[in-house]
Image: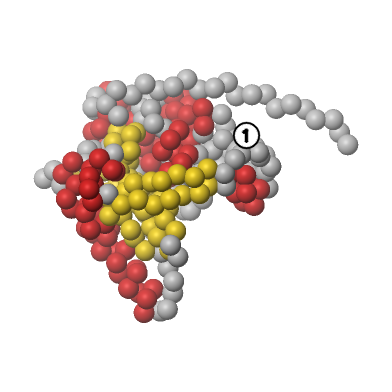
Amino acid sequence: MLHKQLYQMTPREAGRYIGYIHQAEPDLRHRIAAIGRKNIGQPYTLNLLGEFPYEIHDSLPMFSLDHSDCVVFAEHTYAMALSQSWEEFFWMLQRIRYRDGVIGVKTRNHYTELDWNVQNRWLVTDVSAQLAGANAATYDMTVDRARFLKTRHHTDASIPVETSRQSYVPKERVVEVASQLQEGDFVNVISTKNGEYWASHVGLVVLGPNGERHFLHSSEPQVREETFASFMARAAEREARNAREGKNGQKLAGFKFLRLNDDIVVPPMAPQPRPVATPAA
C-alpha cells in the first residue's frame, strides 16, 4: 500500500492508508501535504463532480480515486486529511462539497468564491486582503444560481441573484506574500477575460525542501507540484501563444489565498431529506 500512489489504490486500500497516515502524521498541515503528494501523477479529467447514484439523472460520480480535476483533488485531499477511515472520508467529502452536507445539485458548491469558500469557512478563511494590504486588488461578482441551475442542470430553483466584491493578490505581488503562506492553505487562481474576473482553478500550498512555497494542484495532464513562479510562467506562455494566434483567451490576474484554520470544528451534516413522492400524471 505504501508503495502505491493513491490513484492506484482500491477504495479498501485507500481506507487503510487514510487510517495509517492519520496516525503516522499527526500534524494536519503536514498530513494534507503528504496526502496531496500521494496523488502526484494522478490523471486529470474535467467534470468529475456529481451526485450519481443519489440523483439518477446525473452520471458523474460522488467520488473518484483514479482521476481528478482541480476541485476534486482539493476536496479529496482535505476530506482524507480530516478523516480516519474510508467511511469518515466519504462523509467528510459530502460535508465539504455540499451546503450543510445535503447532497443534491441545488446544494452543491458550484461557485468557488460565493459557494465553496463561504460554505467551508469552518475549514479555511480568506486572507487575501490581509496578505496584500494596500496592494490588494478587487473585482465584483454577480451570481445568478437560478439561471445557472436551469441552463446547466435543467433544474428549477428560486434563488435570488447575489453580488459580491472579492479581494485578491495580483500576480505581480505574489512573491511579496509567499513567505506568509502556510502548508495546507487553499489557493484560488483568479483569471480575467473581457472585463470579468473569476476563480478558474484551485489547489493547495505545500512547502518545498527549503521551505519555499509550492503549488500542488490537478491540471492537464496530471496532478503536479510546482513553484508559483513556474505556474505563472506557464500562464504567460499560454497567453503569448493565444495572442500570436489571435485568440481571446483568459489571462491570469492573481490569486486568492485562504488560510487553513487552526482550530477546525466540523459542523454537523444536515439530515438528508427523504424525497417526496409525486402523484403519477
Q: Indicate the secondary structure of the residue bearing disc 1.
A: loop
Q: Residue at x 44, y 58 (%)?
A: 196
Residue 206 visible in the shown view: no
- In the rendered view, would you say 43 is above or below 108? below
- The x and y percentages for residue 244 are 36, 79
User: Which of the 4 quarters of the picture holds residue 247?
Assistant: bottom left
Residue for point 62% across, 49% down: 147
Instruction: Judge the density around disc 1: few (<14), some (14-19), many (≥20) Cα neighbours within 10 Å.
Output: few
> Compared with residue 67, is residue 24 higher up or lower down, i.e. above or below?
above
Above or below residue 241? Residue 160 is above
Q: Percent x, y for residue 72? A: 44, 43
Q: Residue at x 29, y 47 (%)?
A: 216
Amino acid bearing label 1: Tyr
Residue furthest left in the image = 210
Report the quarter where the C terminus lies.
top right
How was this image coloured?
A: secondary structure
156 vs 128, left or right, is right
Q: Residue furthest right?
A: 281
Is 207 displayed left or right of 278 in the figure? left
Please identify the quadrant where the N terminus is shown.
top left
Q: Which residue is mark 1?
A: 54
Whether residue 83 appears in this view of the structure is: yes
Q: Nearer the viewer, residue 222 or 92?
A: 92
Image x and y of residue 195, in percent: 43, 62
**In the drawing, does residue 215 fall left or right of residue 152?**
left
Q: Residue at x 65, y 38 (%)?
A: 158
Name the side, left or right, on which 24 lies relative to 159: left
The x, y position of residue 239, in whole percent, is 35, 69
